[in-house]
Image: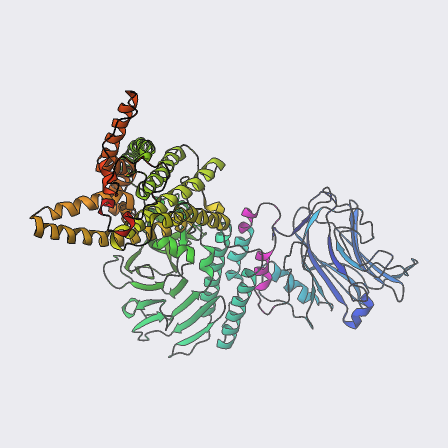
Amino acid sequence: MNKGIYLNGDRGATFLHFGNYKNSCISDPTLCGPQGVTFSFFWKNQETQSRFAFASGGKIISNGFSVFTNPMGGYVEIYTRGNSRRWKAKIKPPGPFWTHILFTWTMKDGLKVYINGTFNSSDEVGSVSENNYDDTYTDLVIGTGNVPTYGHIVTGAFDEFVIWERALSPREICLYYKAARADDTVFPPTTETPSYVRTTTDSIGLQAVTSPHHAVLSNLSEDVPGAEAAASMPVMALLQSLPFSLPNKTIPQDSAHNLTQSLLKSVDEVMSSSNWKEDEQWTPVVSGLIDTVDKVMVHMVSKLQSKSDMPVTIGGKSYVADYSLMKIPQNYNLSSYRFPMQGKNYISVPGEAFAMQTQTTIVGLFYHNMHNYYKQINPLRTRINEAADYKDYKIQVASYLISLKVEPLPALSFNLSTEPLIRIVLTHQLSKEQQLQASNQSNKVFLYCGFLDYSSKEGVWSNEGCMRTGGNLSYSICVCNHLTNFAILMQVVPVELAKSHQIALSTITYVGCSISIFCLAITLVTFAVLSSVSTIRNQRYHIHANLSFAILVAQILLLISFRFEPGTMPCKVMAVLLHFFFLCAFAWMLVEGLHLYSMVVKVFGSEGSKHFYYYGIGWGSPLVICVVSMTSSLGSYGEVGNCWLSLQNGAIWAFVAPALFVIMVNIGILIAVTRIISRISAENYKVHGDANSVKLTAKAVAVLLPILGISWIFGVLAVNDHSLLFQYMFAAFNSLQGFFIFLFHCLLNSEVRAAFKHKTKVWSLTSSSIRNINVKPFNSDIMNGNKGGVSPTKMHTWDKSTNSANRIDLSAV
């Protein structure tokens, strides 16, 4: 009972205001008719001395009622306007504990006050009041008087303010008080729907319901003064007392069915209130509620009226759970038992486990929504040893909860490898987020056959005496050697490499990226220096230069990003830049493939007509993707683990999808180019007798791999600890991508080497001050059609000649 709405008179004059009740039974008792009226509430005084009126339905000089207390004592007053009468009865203010105050009034019997269900004082006759009753205040207020100034604020806690528009009898008052305290299960009837109020904290109050348990269960939905974490303790006490308050007498089948429906309906009303949250804080309360429902049902089936020779079965459905109650006579032959009888989720008991030497009762419950309250289970608060090994990763209930109770207990095998055993089949109920986590091959999924263990009076998840024997990510099959509440628990743990492998891969990345950065810088300088040579200033080498620049910046940013902490602003900025430049690297790899396709496989267009499209693909498309990604999920950059895109909410696909597209396109282009090279090599063998066609093809593939980015396919294969080899291959090949570009397209490239020799010769002639010598034309000029005398080298960026665009350019390979 230690809950309610707390009013603190010392902090901002807090009080409860329920609105205006003008011309109603609340503000004018004469409107209640001969039935009268009953006011009821719980009150706990937070001070040794209460200071003023804490409840009023009209000003003291007006119609209605008022409750007043001060250090000397207190009283309850009822006023009627028509005949100017007042009824007044003394009360004693409560101390720092919950006190139930109820008073009734009728014109015939006057005012009667009951404290904690017992008659306390009365004023049956009343007296004529000399006050002026023309001025009325009809607001219903708790915590102060209802005058416009609302002065003299009281300090205390209030709960379950109920108004019956009739006077309850002494017996009903006593039964109501016991029901509210869970001392009994009888709830007083009302001639019509009682008035009730919703507080400013949106507690539901104590409403008129059909369930005898609702007076207890409704307490669960109200706000708790102080820390919410302590809410479950008084609730648990109420829940545990409920099964022992049930009547100890035979219950007819219809009554048992109605009581079950009422109980489950009340549970639904309590759990659907706005104060219940699907988080770890409420799991003890939910566990206690499940245990209470089980105990009430077990008690009910034990008192179920039955026939002497035939089983009695009661079953039904509700929003909370499907249920089945069965009472089986002695010596009845039961081959087996399954609950529910139909569906993919069930629990079964073999027939040999039933002794049948005495009367047997069975209770089955299949809960529909209880699993939603177990999404964040701390592994250290369970009795699952395997889960405790991964204490940083929460456990989630991944199936419905199913319960089966049999009395007397069935005879089951202690050994989980021999029969008879309980068999449980449950389908998994996973949210989209859980499905993504479970299907992610970077995660390891642990599935446990768990149950709520109440041996310590608080439901704790355990897997002792249970074993998962089959299933997949869609369902599980379990065997157990005991009965209780069962569910499938799921724990998702990210796969982590051993420390030695982490250090090795990190070292490879640092060393490889450092080498690549150095080599790419040399490559860019070389291309810049040799840009005046016609063979180097063509479109192919400009694409090489843009690709080298994108990879160079991306790898520099990658090494810098290791120094920032995830979640910081520098890390988020670094993640955005990394996303952009790695996308640019892939975009220029795509351009490399498209240009190669246009020069070798399908010759079309001129170089001058394509470079604008190439720059749009290489720098424009990554910018568009990054802008869209940042706009939709900026919070996914640099938050968890490293300065990169989040793997949790799908944001990583803003990089993976374009990368996979480029890889697949370039693989297709590589296959097409390789076929052409093989065909030409075969023709050369027929004409010239060259037997090195296979060697030539292999060399061409090795040269093309770095610029087409095919080695990134190892990143797709390196998804978990079972593909450790691919992780090493991915780290080595991609960190050294810049080195391979320098090696094959700069250092060992015959055109670059010839251009460098030509440039060196020009430099030497220039340094010797030889100005008017006839320099022998460079062989690449002859290849491009300059067969005459010396032609001055053109300095513009793009070679506008269409000669190279109208033939198969094998020099691209």
Q: Is residue 366 left or right of residue 210?
A: left
- How was the colour assigned to the protein in this rendering? rainbow
Q: Is residue 288 left or right of residue 203?
A: left
Q: Is residue 681 in the magenta section?
A: no
Q: Position of residue 587 (x, y in %)?
A: 36, 47
Name the residue nearer the viewer: 437 or 758: 758
Reply above or below: 138 against 150. Answer: below
Q: Where, quadrant-wise, is the C terminus in this rendering? A: top left
Which span is picked out in magenta?
Answer: 206-233
Residue 538 seen in the figure: yes
Q: Is residue 592 left or right of residue 779?
A: right
**Circle count:** 0
| Farthest residue, direction top | 768
Name the residue nearer the viewer: 438 or 7: 438
Residue 404, picture quadrant: bottom left
Which residue sits at x=33%, y=62%?
475
Reply above or below: 603 against 265. Answer: above
